[in-house]
Amino acid sequence: MNRISTQPADRLRLVPPDGGRRPGPPALVLVAHGSRDPRALHTVRALLDEVRALRPALPVHLGHIELNAPLLPDTLAALGDTPSVLVPLLLGRGYHVKQDIPEMAAAAPGHARVAAPLGPHPLLVDTLYDRLTEAGWPPAPSEAERRTSAVVLAAAGSRDPDSAADTRRTAHLLADRLGVPVIPAYASAAIPTVDTAVRALTARGRHRIAVASYFTAPGRFATECAAKSPWLASAPLGAHPAMARLIVHRYDQVLSMPVRSVA
């Protein structure tokens, strides 16, 4: 009898106190800049849907730095003590990546870690290439076409030299992919402008000049830069499948790193 009566107690000791439930993965919080252009919010939400389709079991949320709701602090407050990984929907290092987002993460009620910005990365180049071909860039240009073609990589611009370095790296990767010169240019806060870059390429005998829109979503800067193209202009990066894969990749990178303890 003693042997039989002790079996249930032994089995109960094998069951963890929480009933065996494992904690869920940290939430992925996509951090968008925010825009007054309603197309930007629509695009970001479509991109969120792409991410959710890739990882159906992953809780995915949105937070904006400014201009749109929900603002990032509100998203983090709503998560409470749920751990999260903040993935900036930004294309390089700059003030928002270095200051704003880490400060908001530090003020979150739950443990929040910040991923690297999306760029530079080959998946961005895949997206840029697809957007250019959608706009009319020949997928298999002849040697004669290559000799007269070039691309201006139009970005928002920043005073931070690291941001410019990241954009130049993307321009080099895109040039390798296309086999033509690619010059980075900026809508504000940095030089050269798109107009200046177009003139420089024209002076070098490049008359088929495309503007590649290095913006995550439609907006004023993207529209103004596209209007300066003498040939064709691509759409912003948008809700491209490669963008969703890159967001998940940045999330996974953070989870692969050890959590640093705070002294």
Image (cartoon, helix red, strand yellow):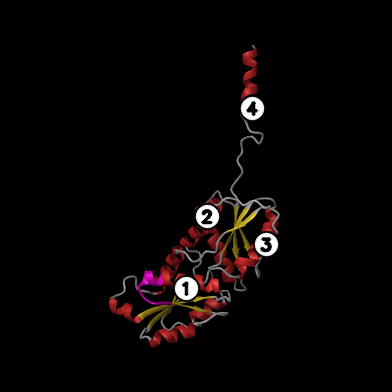
Q: Residues within 10 Å of mark 1 (few under 14, many from 20)?
A: some
Looking at the image, is mark 2 or mark 3 earlier in the sequence? 3
Residue 64 visible (yes or no): no
- Check disc 2 and report the residue beneath it: 253
- Tell me the element at label 1: helix
- Disc 1 and disc 3 in contact, CB within 8 angstroms: no
Alpha-carbon distance for marks 1 and 2? Answer: 23 Å
Q: Amino acid at mark 4?
A: Arg
Q: Which residue is depicted at the point 61% across and 35% down?
A: 20
Q: Which residue is depicted at the point 43% across and 85% down?
A: 200
Q: Residues within 10 Å of mark 4 (few under 14, many from 20)?
A: few
Looking at the image, is mark 4 or mark 1 earlier in the sequence? 4
Name the foreground residue: 81 vs 167.
167
Alpha-carbon distance for marks 2 and 3? Answer: 20 Å
- Check disc 3 and report the residue beneath it: 104
Query: Picture coordinates of residue 27 (x, y %)?
Result: 60, 53
- Disc 2 and disc 3 in contact, CB within 8 angstroms: no
- Tell me the element at label 4: helix
Q: Is residue 181 magenta?
A: yes
Q: Amino acid at mark 2?
A: Gln
Please tell me the numbered disc located at residue 13.
Answer: 4
Residue 93 location, quadrant:
bottom right
- Check disc 1 and report the residue beneath it: 168
Q: Which residue is depicted at the point 67% across and 57% down?
A: 76
Nearer the observer: mark 4 or 1; the answer is 1
